[in-house]
Image (cartoon, helix red, strand yellow):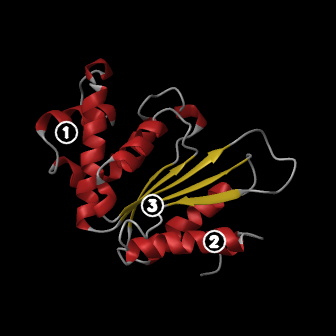
Amino acid sequence: MTEGSAADRLVGRTGELATMQRFVDGLRVGERPAAAIRLVLIEGPAGIGKSLLWLAGQELATKRGIRVLRARPTETEAGYAYAALGDLLRDAWPDLQATLPRQQRHSLAVALGIADDPATSIDPALVQAATSNGLLALAAERPLLVAIDDAPWPGGPQIVRSASSSPSVARPMRLCRSTSTGPFPTSQSSGCGSSR
């Protein structure tokens, strides 16, 4: 790792970093879905370094040529239903719009704040379908890591649902999610679990 990288700043997280390494390496080599770690969930109380581990996973992926889409909504965005979705997909919009059917494209554009139509015209089912189809299309081009920090924010659950419930098991797409489990920690323990 280069000096100043997120992995360099992690202290006492050798096991968690090794899990993240296996997770990213499985995506890069296109492991068969049954053998691959498809989801990494980093959870624990606020302030124990979940976001730093989350960033380390993205650095590993980027160094290996994996496309990374990230959502890291802020507290000020908490009232906006599609803030996390906008954070995740806005930069990928040029690639996404050509892959989606007209109605899905329009609903997603409104949800992302790209179209001028009022938010009341958003059809949540079309936004869900557009998100799922868009992620699949991006994953078909090259391996894709969907990284969501603090998924309980409004908008986060639909991203997680789209990425993990879509028929992507044969596609090179993985999900890395961090979430807080309670108030600021009284001890410095954390969990980094994986799912196959």
Q: Gap in Å between the C-alphas at discs 1 and 2? A: 37 Å
Give the residue type that dot 1 points to. Answer: Arg
Q: Is residue 5 left or right of residue 67?
A: right
Q: Which residue is mark 3?
A: 38
The image's mark for residue 17 is 2
Give the residue type that dot 3 points to. Answer: Arg
Whether residue 114 is visible here, answered yes or no, is no
| Secondary element at image label 2 | helix
2 and 3 marks in contact (CB < 8 Å): no
Q: Nearer the viewer, residue 171 or 82?
A: 171
Which mark is in front, 3 or 1? 3
Q: Callout 1: few (<14), some (14-19), or many (20+) C-alpha neighbours within 10 Å? A: many
The image's mark for residue 120 is none
Q: Gap in Å between the C-alphas at discs 2 and 3? A: 16 Å
Q: Earlier in the sequence, mark 3 or mark 1?
A: 3
146 over 76 or under it: above or below: below
Q: Nearer the viewer, residue 189 or 141?
A: 189
The image shows residue 167 at horizontal and vertical percentages of 29, 51
The image shows residue 96 at horizontal and vertical percentages of 23, 50
Q: Earlier in the sequence, mark 2 or mark 3?
A: 2
Q: Is residue 61 left or right of residue 122?
A: right
The image shows residue 86 at horizontal and vertical percentages of 39, 41
| Secondary element at image label 1 | helix
| Residue 87 placement: quadrant | top left
Whether residue 51 is visible here, answered yes or no, is yes
Instruction: Please tell me which residue is depicted at 54% across the width and 66% down the height of the picture.
Output: 57
